[in-house]
Amino acid sequence: MRTKLPILLALVLMAIAAGYWLRLLDSLRWNSSPSTVPPPAPRADIPPISNGGTPGGTVGVPASGTGGVERGAPRPTPHAGYPPGGPTPNAPDREPPALTPAKPQMLVDNAVLAVENQRYISAEISEEGELFGRPMAGVGHYFEMRNGPIPMIHLDLTIRVDSVSTSLMQVCNGTTFWTYRKLPFAETLSKLDAVRAITALEQAAGRMPPGAVMSSPGLGGLGRLMRGLNARFDFTSVQGDVEEGMPVWKLTGVWKAEVLARLLPDQKDAVAKGRSYDTSRLSARLPDGVVIFLRQHDYFPLRIDYCRGASKSAPRCLLSLKFKDVSFNGPIESSQFLFTPGSLEYSDRTDEFVRSLGVTP
């Protein structure tokens, strides 16, 4: 019995730590911030949910549509390396022609549009990282539908650290954002008013306190994630690579100077004046760079790595987020975007979240 106590204690501590890690993973996944990329034009061709959102129903597809992307929908702006006609987001996965990469920033701009111009996104999602020196891995599913100003999303993940299993579910119906976490010995449930939360994020842009840089929840879906990366990192390196058997552009970015100055307040003068500074003094839970792998034929992000030593030949990956079996075809069951708390108690964190951004509730 004595030999089992340290093991049980370790598992309990690991479960508690995993709960903290899940919150950190949320922030790394959905680092929300505005971007210089203009939002896509309003889509008049997108009708409301055909069945009024009845559980188990199906989201309607416009009569003129051809699946995930309708005819006449805006497309990402192709760079000069593409042949006339540009890339096609729903093109089959095939070997593309040899391309000359555009400037890294242009590729990231196109990646933002490539995601936001999709009405439907469904994919398998996986994560790999580390927790206190122990490997962590998670698998699950991601669904997104753009049917209004705020995308509907569904994310579910099962995460394991050694023998400890935890799970996370985030669901947004366009107005309410639910976050459910299950640990071995507890369950938590919270919600946000999605409209108020995103409005506060917009108001806090450019003056978000350092402690909140990586604490934004999964609001706005994959498009907002890409906008956050675009707004907070400078991408200066691009090279061809292969991911999941497909040609990709591998983009490397580092924190923008104004963000880094807030993360390293004792070195902000050196950062502002372009002098040498020490990124190893960043919080151990924060990356110093990010690496994005974009499919060459449509710019969709297949993989996002948050790294320490991102500019080195062998960076240490804090978290790797991967998408597989990506589909833009609909419809998606509307029940994916509905969440019923049942008898489980929940907390409304909207005011707390707004105040954390320095905005008056």
Image (spheres, rainbow, N blue to C red):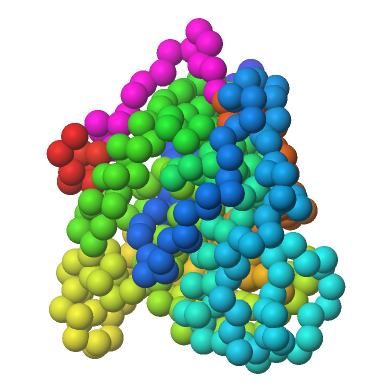
Which secondary structure is most common in the magenta stretch?
loop
The residue lying toward the viewer, choosing from 157 and 314, is 157
Tell me: 5 left or right of 278.
right
Residue 11 placed where, x, y %? Answer: 57, 31
Image location of residue 261, percent across then percent down: 23, 70
- Residue beneath the point at 34% across and 24% down: 348
- 26 is higher (above) or lower (below) than 285: above
**Segment colored magenta:** 339-353
* 207, above or below 310, in the image: above
Q: Where is residue 2 in the image (x, y as percent from the top left)?
A: 60, 22
* Quadrant housing the C terminus: top left
Q: Does the magenta stretch include residue 345?
A: yes
Q: In which quarter of the image is residue 159?
A: top right
Judge whether residue 317 can be spotted in this image: no
Quarter of the image with the N terminus in it? top right
Quadrant hosting residue 100: bottom right
